[in-house]
Amino acid sequence: MSLRRRKMKMMHNDIYKTFKEDFPSRHFIRFGDNRHLSLYIGRDDDARYSFDFRGIYKPVRISSSDVIAVEQYKDGDIYTLRFSLEDSELLEYFCTFCQDLLDSVRVTNDDETAYHTLRSRYYSWRQLFRPDNARMTEAEIMGLMGELLFLRDFMIPNRGIDIALESWTGPEKTHKDFSDQQDWFEIKAISFGKETVRISSIEQLDSDIEGTLVVYDLEKMSPSFDGIRLNQLVNNIISLLVNTSQKEMFMDKLQLFGFDFSNENENLVFALRNERHYRVNPDSFPRIRRSMLPDAITRVQYELLLTEIEPYKMN
């Protein structure tokens, strides 16, 4: 881990640790490295975890969400912009939000610019703190987990953050989950013990270029198990991103899935039991191709028996 990432991780831990120190209502402490700006974390009058920016600027209307309350008020010449967490169960993710706010104004030295930057960052995060979204199904959560695991563990380390994010097209419902100038990947997450993997469209494996089918075996566990949770996986990837444009791109793609930091996601916990990569050879890998079908057939779904594609398994 680089020095910068270690420092970011330490800062995130410091924010969480500070919030958990159980200091009283109406108590704030100055936080962050930027001494040109007045940035604070603490608890507001209602004992909610809060982030404050105080300065001289021209305020504009900012609407609250169900999870983050936004308040603005004036004391003399100084305005305060305050973000307060309505649901304390989401504190870990609120800490990541606060860290992003701090990072976004790390080199800003005037209040007006800082105010509009913080306002913009809040509206980006607001979409992920929206508990009124239609709930993702268990199958959708597993599918997103598979793509996020591959993004975190393979694409980012091997392709770099920018290329990894740009190549992730699964949320956009394109034919392949990941594709770049080097390769394409189709990602599947299946229940542990299942013997088949479902291919939901012809195009997912149809290509004249060799690609890779990646299959994750996920076993559903009890909520008390220390396993993979979707919220934590998202949070972990956000902590790897190093600039605002990367975070914006990642959040935009998550929204296409209908993801938000719902408490209900915490109850779905999985253990990763296996990860398998299969080389999709253009000449011999068993699959249905568009060229095999008459024009009258427009949509085909099928299942692959995993034991029968074992010869294509990669080390």
Image: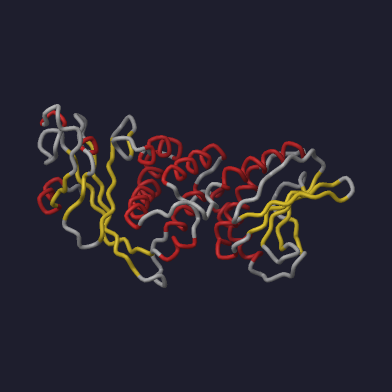
Q: Total label count?
A: 0
Q: Which residue is located at x 27 percent, y 62 percent?
A: 273
- Left/right of residue 89 with respect to residue 200 in the rendered view: right
In this view, the residue in front, 223 or 247, is 223
Residue lying at the far right of the rendered structure: 76
Give residue 45's quadrant in the image: bottom right
Please state the horizontal and vertical placement of residue 302, each as a whole percent of the image: 16, 45
Q: Which residue is located at x 41 percent, y 43 percent?
A: 156
Give residue 298's quadrant in the image: top left
In this view, the residue in front, 45 or 22, is 45
Please state the horizontal and vertical placement of residue 72, each as a whole percent of the image: 76, 49
Please state the horizontal and vertical placement of residue 293, each as a whole percent of the image: 11, 31
Please state the horizontal and vertical placement of residue 9, each as a whole percent of the image: 55, 55
The image shows residue 249, relative to residue 10, as above or below, that is above
Q: Which residue is located at x 26 percent, y 60 percent?
A: 191
In this view, the residue in front, 274 or 295, is 295
